[in-house]
Image (spheres, helix red, strand yellow):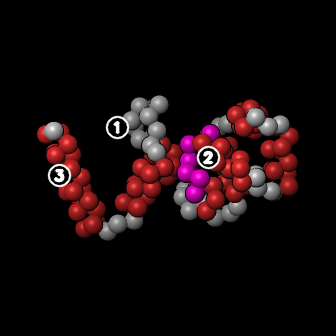
Amino acid sequence: MGTINERLFQLIESDNKSQKELALYLNIDESTISSWKRRGTDPPSEIIMRIAEYFQVPVRYLIEGNLKITDIVDLRYAPNKLGPDDHLTDAEVDFCLKYRQLSPQHKSMIDKIMEIALDIDYKK
């Protein structure tokens, strides 16, 4: 699914961010980001974690690219339960992605386990 570089610039575009905004967040020159795009090079490893933090995506997405941007956006802003400032953690996103891969029978089992766990928590 492409390179870290390609995923980075997809995120910039899909989140309607500018290279300048990202550069300010990372405390680097905007020309550095421009050169990554122009040359097709990846950001240094020490910056990748901060980029993931800025876009609120798992670092794994930037490195491996095995998630769709639409999946991340959908999970980050689940409108039914979360407000605009309540973002899912990487662990919660990972859980949701694993859940999506389950068969309907296994999803039903997980749903029942969650209902039991929630009932126990609410009774405390």
Horizontal side of residue 39 vs 5, given as left or right? right
What residue is pinned by disc 3? 116
Give the main secondary structure of the magenta stretch. helix
Note whether residue 9 is visible.
Answer: no
Q: Establish if 105 lies above or below 80.
A: below
Seen in the image, is 47 located left or right of residue 110? right
Q: Which residue: 72% across, 54% down?
A: 45
Disc 1 is placed on an element classified as loop
What residue is drawn where x is 40% and y is 56%? 95
Residue nearest the observer in this picture, 2 or 112: 112
- Closer to the chain start, of discs 1 and 2, is 2
Name the residue located 56 percent from the left edge and 62 percent from the top edge: 66
Q: Label 2 amino acid? A: Ala
Mark 1 or 3, closer to the camera: 3
> Which dot marks residue 24?
none
The answer for how far apart the CA atoms under marks 1 and 2 are is 23 Å
Q: Quadrant of the C terminus?
A: top left
What residue did someone put label 2 on? 52
Q: How many marks?
A: 3
Q: Quadrant of residue 101?
A: bottom left
Q: CA distance from mark 1 to mark 3?
A: 19 Å
Does label 2 or label 3 sit earlier along the sequence? Answer: 2
Task: Find the magenta span and give its range.
Answer: 54-61
Q: Secondary structure at mark 3?
A: helix
The image quadrant where one finds the N terminus is: bottom right
Determine the CA span between mark 2 and mark 3: 34 Å
Q: Are marks 1 and 2 in contact (CB under 8 Å)?
A: no
Q: Residue under circle 1?
A: 81
Q: Is residue 58 magenta?
A: yes
Res 37 seen here: yes
